[in-house]
Image (cartoon, rainbow, N blue to C red):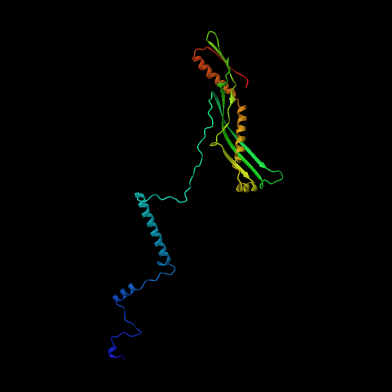
Amino acid sequence: MARDGEINEPTREFPGYPTGESVRARSEDVTPEPAPGAPASGGPARGLLGVLGAVALAVVVLLGVQATGILPEFRNPFAKQQTDRSQPPLLKSIRDLSRYVAAEGNFQVVVDLQHDRNNVPEFLLNQRTLFVGAGTIEAYVDFARISDGAVVVSPDGKSVEIKLPAPQLGETNLDLEKSYVFAEQRGLLNRLSDLVAGDPNRQQQVYRLAEERITAAARESGLTARAEENTRKMLEGLLRSLGYEKITVSYTAP
C-alpha cells in the first residue's frame, strides 16, 4: 500500500505523461540528429560555403565599383606584352628611276630542301624543309639607257623610228605573307642543336633558293617578250596622239 502522501506522485517505474508545454520546451532544446547517410549541415562544408559566398560578394562589389569609375581598371598581371626596340630607318641612298614596267609575273614554287649525312640515320641527323614560296618579278624597259640617235623622225614629220634597249627582269620579290613552310622534319641532334644554339639564318637559304627558282621560271615564261609588246603598244598610242602616222619600235640585243 502506498502512503497517503504519495498517492498523487508518479511511480519511478512509470514516469508521468509529458504535457504540451514540456514537449515544446524539449524540442527547442534538442537539435535533431541527421539521418543516416545524409551530409552534415555544419562543420567544414558550411565554412567553405561561407568563404565562397564572401568572395563572390567581394567580386561583385569590386566590379560594381570599377564600373562606376571610382577604382582603376584591373589588369592581368601575367598578360602578354610586346616591346618594339627596333632602330629608326636609315636612308642610305636615293636613285632616280626611268623604268617603264611593261609586265609583271606572279609565280609560286615549292622548295624541298634536305640536309643530312651519309651513313647517319635520318632520325638522328636530318633537316628537311618543304617551303611554298610566292613571289613577283617585273619586266621593264630602262629609258635612261636610250642612246643618242635612237629616235629618228622623218623629214615630213609623219613617221618616227625608235630603238629601245631590250627589256630586263627586275629582282624577285618574295611575298612572305603568301609564302609559308608546309612541312619540316628535323632529327634528334638537330633539335638539340636548336635548343643550345639556334641558327637565325636557317630559313635564308630556303628563301634564296625560292627566289632563284622564280627568277629561272620568269626567264622561261616569255615575260620579256610580253614587255616588248606592251611597250610597243604604249609608244604607238602615245606617238599617234602627237600626229605621227608611222611608228617603228625596235629593240637592241640584250
Query: What is the residue that sits farthest to the top in this orientation?
Result: 156
Q: Residue at x 41, y 64 (%)?
A: 47
From the viewer's side, name the closer residue of 1 and 211: 211
From the viewer's side, name the closer residue of 43 and 230: 230
Q: Is residue 106 above or below residue 55?
A: above
Position of the N terminus, as image quadrant, is bottom left
- Res 205 → quadrant: top right
- The image position of residue 48, as x and y in percent, is 42, 63
- The image position of residue 173, as x and y in percent, is 56, 32
- The image position of residue 61, as x and y in percent, is 36, 55
Q: Is residue 34 above or below residue 97?
A: below
- The image position of residue 69, as x and y in percent, is 35, 49
Q: Is residue 77 left or right of residue 196?
A: left
Query: What is the residue that sits farthest to the right in this orientation?
Result: 119
Q: Residue at x 55, y 25 (%)?
A: 103
From the viewer's side, name the closer residue of 87 and 157: 87
Q: Is residue 92 left or right of residue 185?
A: left
Circle count: 0
Position of the C terminus, as image quadrant, is top right
Q: Is residue 130 above or below residue 35?
A: above
Q: Is residue 26 above or below residue 55?
A: below
